[in-house]
Amino acid sequence: MNAAPLSEIVWVYKEVTQRRAHGIPAGRSFEVHVQTRKGPGLSISEIPEATVDKLVLHVAQVAPWAILGYTDELAQEWNRDREAVIRVVDERRKDAPKDARSTLPECGREARR
């Protein structure tokens, strides 16, 4: 299993994939993605949705500077200019409380396969 120091975490989001068989919903799978300052980031897949939600909530509590949730715009910015996203997170980190008690944000994205 891969891991990253909390100080390296930049962006965390949940991915929900709706599987289909002949156009008929055939189940969903859940994944959590952790993007870090360096390297390709981390993904944990094929785990229960409640576990994904707990992981995202935990990151919100221990790394309140991290960006939570997925948007197409953020993904494009991450791919185009990762350093700009990291600068935003660095600013958030300066303002982050030492003992954050966050609530779980809307953090998912839907994917279809």
Image (cartoon, rainbow, N blue to C red):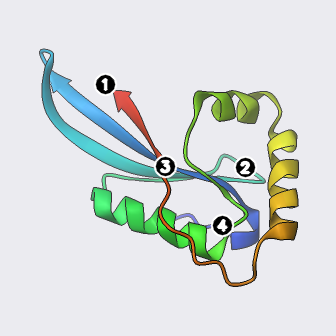
Q: Earlier in the sequence, mark 3 or mark 4?
A: 4
Q: Earlier in the sequence, mark 1 or mark 3?
A: 3
Q: Earlier in the sequence, mark 1 or mark 2?
A: 2
Mark 3 and mark 4: Cα distance apart in space: 20 Å
Mark 4 and mark 1: Cα distance apart in space: 29 Å
Left or right placement of residue 75 versus residue 107 in this view: right
Q: Amino acid type of disc 2?
A: Gly
Q: Amino acid type of disc 3?
A: Cys
How would you rate the neighbour count of disc 4 (Cα within 10 Å): few for under 14, some for 14-19, many for 20 or more?
A: some
Q: Earlier in the sequence, mark 3 or mark 2?
A: 2
Residue at left offset 68%, top offset 84%: 99
> Does 55 appear above or below 78?
below
Task: Read off the residue under disc 3.
Answer: 107
x then y, percent, for residue 8: 75, 63
Task: Read off the residue under disc 2.
Answer: 39
Q: Which numbered disc covers residue 113?
A: 1
Q: Amino acid type of disc 1?
A: Arg
Q: Are marks 4 and 1 in contact (CB under 8 Å)?
A: no
> Does 29 appear above or below 103?
above
